[in-house]
Image: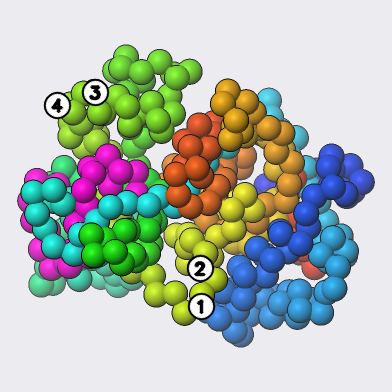
Amino acid sequence: MMHNLKKHFKRISFKEINGWDHDSHIEAYEALKRGIIFQYRHSPKSKKISSLLDKIHNSKNPKYFFEQNYIPYKFFDYDKITSLFTGYYEPYLEASHTRSEEYYIPLYAPPKNLIKCENIKIKSNMITGYTHLLQIDNKFIIPPTREMINNFTLEKTDVLAWLKDPIEAYFMHIQGSGKLIFTDGTSKIFTYAAKNGFPYTSIGKVLVSLGFIEEQEISMDAIKNWFKNNSNKMNDILNKNKSYIFFKQHVNENNDYHAIGQTGIELTPERSLAVDLSIYDINTPIWLETITPSKKISCIEKFQRLMIAQDTGSAIKGFIRGDIFFGSGYDAGQIAGKMKEKGNIIIFLLKDEVDFYG
């Protein structure tokens, strides 16, 4: 799970966690429960997952459950590693089942010949540095970039829908999922399915580096407004990010819909946290202390609560880098788009694992 734990974390007690007694533990407990059930469905033979699921089902007190089964470790190495916590959300977009002059932005399913590099057995034919490749006959080639996909019709793939706004379509790629409201009044949910394998480039950083937006002013709203006022430069800037996301329709078997993260886990607003999954195990409880934008104009709020590591993203790299899921729709987007703060974390390790990690 953790690399070099002792170098960055130290063991503490629950009494040392500011705000622990005042948190709504049931919300974090339910988020964790959904995540562990998802893991169990995909790995029913895992003793660790089945054991934890039994403990969850047998627990009657969420706060007591965490205190009895986990040990908190606080990150302390802030002099060497800079923290950053941002936000994301599930957007609502206007869409059509057919292409027209108004709805012309395609939402693509993964190409049928797109293959993860880890699934390619012929190592001698692999091209290093990419997560995905296209297979044509017996050869593997680099997938097209965002610019190439936008300029040419993508072969061997399906168009899931046609979107109206290129900026909103781009931010759906960034968020990783979205709810589409179709012209016939129906709605469908589409979630992350795959990517073309190119590294993610922040267009916010591109706009700052080019002097178009001041660094302290950068936000999702600032980026959208800049594009609206500079539409002639939009494609050139967007194409700086070669990464491209492909989607799939989410079929909701239950009436209680939850947004879906890249991991496939149902997300809980202000409880699900996207983290670097090369460092943390999925469903690791993480106590987060930061500040977040308020729904009130020009206000901030203290944010102290137990989060669950249930998602990831191309830009989420490092020990204290996280992305808070704020929910769905316009209001959630307003908060998520402004979220960019430092913070402190405390990770919860299962007691059964502590002897191994030290």
Q: Amino acid at mark 1?
A: Asn
Q: Is residue 257 left or right of residue 124?
A: right
Quarter residue 281 falls in: bottom right
Q: Residues within 10 Å of mark 1 (few under 14, many from 20)?
A: few
Taking the spot 37% from the left edge, 58% from the top edge, the residue there is: 179
Which residue, given by chain and number where applicable, does mark 4 sit on?
232
Q: Going 62% across and 76% down the picture, which residue do you hit?
A: 37
User: Can you see residue 325?
Assistant: yes
Q: CA distance from mark 3 to mark 2?
A: 36 Å
User: Could you tell me which residue is drawn at 54 percent across and 71 percent down?
Assistant: 256
Chain part drawn in magenta:
149-172
Disc nearest the viewer among 4 and 1: 1
Mark closer to the chain start, 4 or 1: 4
- Between 323 and 95, the one lying in front of the other is 95
Which dot marks residue 229? 3
Residue lying farthest to the front in this orientation: 185
* Residues at marks 1 and 2 touching, judged by CB atoms closer than 8 Å: yes
Q: Which residue is mark 1?
A: 254
What residue is rendered at 16% in x and 42% in y? 147
Location of residue 68 by image quarter:
bottom right
Q: Secondary structure at mark 4?
A: helix
